[in-house]
Image (cartoon, rainbow, N blue to C red):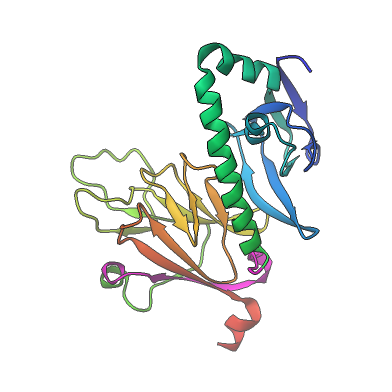
Amino acid sequence: MSELGEVTYGAGHVIYKEGDPGNAVFIITDGKVEVVRLIRDEPVRLTVLSAGAIFGESGVIRNTARSTTVRAITPVTLMVISKEAFDSVFKRENPLALKLLRALSDRLAAVHSQLMTHHLYTEGALQSEVGAIRLLAGSPEMQAQIGVEGVVIKTLPFHIGRHLRPEEKATVRKADLMVQASAGAEISPLHFSIESEEGRLIVRDHASHLGTKVNEQRIGHFEEFSTADLLLGTTSLQAGGMDSPYRFEIIVERAEQAEAG
């Protein structure tokens, strides 16, 4: 493999499989890929990545085999950086940084192992199975704004954020649900959304200032993933940091449950 290059694959192409050697880092310049992990022989989709995303770095940094399978779900163009080129930059510029990255990646791998175990006992929501989606308040502050009954989500995507302050310019689309927030708010004007992607319901963080917590997983532009599956049943959401009052619960009902109600 050359140290740096660009490759293009068609939809359905497997870029690498779980267990393959970690010999390159990839940057998506166009298209989308899905990241999948096998848990007890059951494939679990972790996320979908699009242009600008980097993947494959964990196996290169940790000198381990691939822990996931990555497959193109549209035609995709990738920038490929070989392990040799990646390592040489750190060895030449900052050897200590590589050691710190390896320690951090090991910790992240342990956390993801726990998260994947959690996935075994939950069920991702397929849009075709969903009968009703309701957004409820998860804190007194939010209940005061959206009430006890919450909001029934009828159209996707559904965006959640806050009202712009007078000094802010309207540079982003308005959210479908805009909450009132204090001057030092942890919730961004366009913070997260409920969407359908490849037939599955997901929560997407929109490069918010402090990210979004989905159950026990944090997503955001500074996290490993910016999306998380929305589950059948109840999913807890928190916009911002751990003390943020902008908390919600999403109730996703199966079609037969909604009809029975």
* Residue pictured at 37% horizontal, 41% vertical: 172
Above or below, 26 against 115 in this view is: above
In the image: residue 26, left or right of residue 175: right
Magenta-drawn segment: 121-142
Q: Quadrant of the C terminus?
A: bottom right
Q: Quadrant location of residue 81?
A: top right
- Say whether residue 135 is magenta: yes
Q: Can you give x and y, in whole percent of width and height, for residue 148 in the image?
A: 34, 78
- Say whether residue 225 is magenta: no
Look at the image and tell me whether residue 157 can be seen. Answer: no
Q: Tell which residue pokes out farthest to the bottom in this image.
A: 260
Above or below, 142 against 5 in this view is: below
Q: How many marks?
A: 0
* Residue pictured at 73% horizontal, 31% vertical: 22
Q: Quadrant location of residue 25?
A: top right
Look at the image and tell me whether residue 11 can be seen. Answer: yes
Q: Quadrant of the N terminus?
A: top right
Q: Can you give x and y, in whole percent of width and height, for residue 75 in the image?
A: 74, 34
Q: Can you give x and y, in whole percent of width and height, for residue 37 in the image?
A: 72, 50
Q: Can you give x and y, in whole percent of width and height, for residue 227 in the image?
A: 55, 50
Q: Nearer the viewer, residue 80 or 254?
A: 80
In the image: residue 1, left or right of residue 144: right
Q: Nearer the viewer, residue 228 or 107?
A: 107
In the image: residue 238, left or right of residue 100: left
Q: Tell which residue pokes out farthest to the top in this image.
A: 92
* Residue pictured at 67% horizontal, 34% vertical: 56
